[in-house]
Amino acid sequence: MEYLHSYWRMAYVEAPKEHAANPFVDLPKKSDEEGLILHRGKTVYIALNRFPYNAGHLLVIPYREVADILALTEEEKLEFFDALLLGKQILERGLNPHGFNIGINFGAVAGAGIPQHLHAHIVPRWTGDTNFMPVLGQTRVLPIALLELWKRLKGNDLQTDSSI
């Protein structure tokens, strides 16, 4: 018999469901490695999702707590979208996915886990990466540990690339 270890799942299961503090405000106060932060911009940052849908699942998060994209300043809007492009490029260089899901959930009923703080998801996808495990086993199978993945992707930060 083989065992699948979904090592990150217990932290998710035991995490409080009501967020007393906003983790997106506290995350940038940590070191890049501790916060799994890949890029720090002036108004937004990019981090690996600690509870990913797929290996390499990134979040683009404004530093400022804002619930709706319409509440972003012009500067924040531009950097937010540029960070989506940067995150996609980091994943392309580091993981070579076949495609992407990129999205934003507005409000708890739309699936926003932290509805008071806007964030975008960049989820890399590969042919055949969907299987029965999430449906039947309520488990996601991730082929790489988060810290190992952070180290791999951190080397692909294109923040000095003048095209972004």
Image: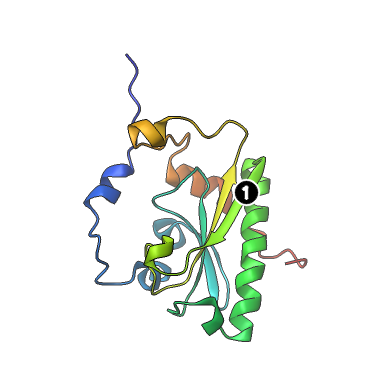
Please identify the quadrant where the C terminus is shown. Answer: bottom right
Q: Which residue is drawn at 58% across and 30% down?
A: 128
Residue 84: image quadrant is: bottom right
Residue 117: image quadrant is: bottom left
Q: Which residue is drawn at 24% across and 65% down?
A: 18
Please identify the quadrant where the N terminus is shown. Answer: top left
- Where is residue 5 shown, x and y percent of the image? 33, 31
Q: Residue at x 59, y 80 (%)?
A: 76
Vertical comparison of 79 with 17: above or below: below
- In this view, which residue lies farthest toward the right? 163
Vertical comparison of 33 with 5: above or below: below
- In this view, which residue lies farthest toward the front? 109
Q: Nearer the viewer, residue 57 or 160?
A: 57
The amino acid on which the numbered mark 1 sits, given as a three-letter code, is: Phe
Mark 1, Cα crowd under 10 Å, few <14 / some 14-19 / many 20+, is some
Total label count?
1
- Where is residue 102 shown, x and y percent of the image? 59, 56
- Where is residue 110 shown, x and y percent of the image? 43, 63
- In this view, which residue lies farthest toward the top? 1
Q: Which residue is drawn at 43% across and 40% down?
A: 145
Q: In the visual, does 34 lie left or right of 81?
A: left
Q: Which of 117 and 35 is in front in this view?
A: 117
**Residue 115, visible in the rendered structure:** yes
- Where is residue 141 shown, x and y percent of the image? 43, 34
Q: Which of 54 and 101 is in front in this view?
A: 101
Q: Which of 137 and 2 is in front in this view?
A: 137
Q: In the visual, does 89 lie left or right of 149?
A: right
Instruction: Look at the numbered disc 1 and give the secondary structure of its residue.
Output: strand
**Residue 112, visible in the rendered structure:** no
Which residue is identified by label 1? 100
